[in-house]
Image: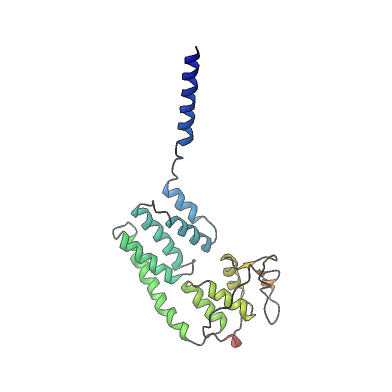
């Protein structure tokens, strides 16, 4: 009887160990991709896709699909034309026969055309709002935000929304001071603060004195 109890106890321990060590079922790639695409605003979606692409276990066709999705996002709502070109090129180099390859080539040409139109504008004498729009669309983030923060000028309503979505502007509890800049109060900036103090930007030749919103 004692040996039976010992055997039963041993069997239970083995079963418990097997249950404890059994790996959790992997989440299907399609579900992970769908979750990334539903992450929130375009900048949150970009971050989620970037996190997904950081998985070294992705199969080549899965990585190509994630690259396409991020590239297509960056070409439009994600405001990152440089990143879009890089992603489309990486996707096509990885999987030139991917089902989305034809569409990727079309979108790559469009993204390159955007770059050809936007890049030279950085050499123009631009107001701060104009320079912000060009830089942001090319994919810059920290420098345009720092420029507005240090200039003491107010971003326009569309720029404010982008800065909020990208995590630079918070509600009343930010540590970087009010977003409301010089001039008349802007209703869309009421109660908004910079989320955290931002260091001074590198000089870029932007004409801040002539910056209007």
Please state if 165 lies on the left or on the right of 29 as rendered.
Answer: right
Who is closer to the viewer here, 74 or 170?
Answer: 170
Residue at far left of view: 97
Colour convention of the picture: rainbow
Please state if 180 lies on the left or on the right of 96 as rendered.
Answer: right
Residue at the spot 50% in from the left edge and 76% down from the top edge? 135
Residue at the spot 51% in from the left edge and 88% down from the top edge? 125
| Total number of numbered discs in the rendering | 0
Who is closer to the viewer here, 23 or 82?
Answer: 23
Position of 203 relative to 90 (above/below): below
Residue 30, image x, y percentages: 42, 49
Residue 23, image x, y percentages: 44, 39
Residue at far top of view: 1
Q: Quadrant of residue 87?
A: bottom left
Residue at the spot 31% in from the left edge and 63% down from the top edge? 93
Residue 177, image x, y percentages: 68, 72
Position of 85 relative to 28 (above/below): below
> Does the image show residue 155?
no
> Does the image show residue 210?
yes
Who is closer to the viewer here, 14 or 43?
Answer: 14
Who is closer to the viewer here, 75 or 67?
Answer: 67
Q: Quadrant where the C terminus lies?
A: bottom right
Residue 154, image x, y percentages: 64, 78
Position of 60 relative to 145 (above/below): above
């Amino acid at each position: 009887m004692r040996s039976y109890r010992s055997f039963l106890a041993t069997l239970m321990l083995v079963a418990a160990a097997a249950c404890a060590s059994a790996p959790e079922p992997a989440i299907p790639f399609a579900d992970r991709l769908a979750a990334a695409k539903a992450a929130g605003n375009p900048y949150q979606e970009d971050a989620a896709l970037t996190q997904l692409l950081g998985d070294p276990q992705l199969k080549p066709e899965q990585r190509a699909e994630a690259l396409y999705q991020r590239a297509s996002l960056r070409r439009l709502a994600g405001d990152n034309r440089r990143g879009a070109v890089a992603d489309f090129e990486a996707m096509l180099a990885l999987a030139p026969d991917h089902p989305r390859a034809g569409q990727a080539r079309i979108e790559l040409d469009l993204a390159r055309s955007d770059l050809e139109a936007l890049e030279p504008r950085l050499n123009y004498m631009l107001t701060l709002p104009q320079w912000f729009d060009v830089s942001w669309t090319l994919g810059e983030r920290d420098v345009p935000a720092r420029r507005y923060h240090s200039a003491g000028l107010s971003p326009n309503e569309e720029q404010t929304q982008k800065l909020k979505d990208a995590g630079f502007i918070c509600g009343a509890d930010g540590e970087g001071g009010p977003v409301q800049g010089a001039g008349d109060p802007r209703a869309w900036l009421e109660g908004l603060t910079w989320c955290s103090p931002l260091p001074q930007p590198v000089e870029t030749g932007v004409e801040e004195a002539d910056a209007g919103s």
